[in-house]
Image (tube, helix red, strand yellow):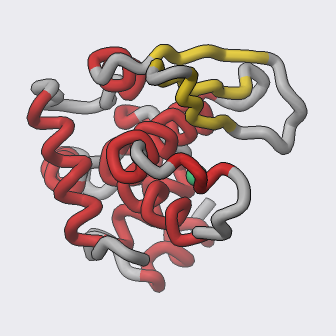
Amino acid sequence: MLYTHWYLRKQADELLEKFKVEGPPVDVKMIAEKLGIEVVELTLPTWFFGTLLDIKGSFYIVVNRLMPETRKKFTLAHEIAHYSLHGDKLCYMKNCKRDYFHREADAFAAELCMPSEMVKKEARNWFNDYKFLAKIFDVSEVAMVRKMQEIGLIKGTDYTWVFAQK
Ligand SMILES: [Zn+2]
């Protein structure tokens, strides 16, 4: 990766601050629109998640309508990340083979949908109940667990244990 994880998180947090997002769920579509990006949902083949398009200086994000809402939200956040981080080098689409662009976008998107500080606060209120937290942040349970592990709220071992209980 070209950017550090810390930097990517900070970029996402700055966007949240700029648009005064104070609590979950993060309205990712609103953020796209405030950035002047038009969000378009289309019925597309299942392997297609979404893409960011620059058509003569106007930005569009295309999202596959057939995906679950949580997946759409993450895809939207991922494309907003490309816009914020790589907007001036959209050649990533085709030949550049810059895989790290997508890893950077994923890190940014995770923070945008599940801001670390917000997750910590809510996790304290709801006793680390990842299922409930996933619901209030409007993300998948897997994504929430991953985030909670990343910021040290649950350990890898807790995670197996939690699932073993079900
Ligand atoms: Zn990407």
The furthest residue to the right: 45
Residue 85 % position (x, y) = 35, 52
The furthest residue to the front: 56
For the residue pair 108 and 159, the one nearer the viewer reads as 108
Residue 150 occupies quadrant = bottom left
Query: Which image quadrant: the C terminus?
Result: bottom right
Look at 52% across and 21% down and name the residue there: 56
Query: Which image quadrant: the N terminus?
Result: bottom left
Does residue 41 show up?
A: yes
For the residue pair 107 and 140, the one nearer the viewer reads as 107
Residue 138 occupies quadrant = top left
Residue 134 % position (x, y) = 44, 43
Look at 37% across and 72% down and name the residue there: 149
| Lateral position of residue 94 relative to residue 153, left or right | right
| Lateral position of residue 109 relative to residue 160, left or right | left
Residue 84 % position (x, y) = 33, 43
Look at 50% across and 40% down and name the residue there: 79
| Lateral position of residue 134 relative to residue 62, left or right | left
Tell me if residue 96 comes above or below residue 87 in the rendering: below
For the residue pair 54 and 148, the one nearer the viewer reads as 54
For the residue pair 60 and 103, the one nearer the viewer reads as 60
Look at 73% across and 30% down and name the residue there: 67
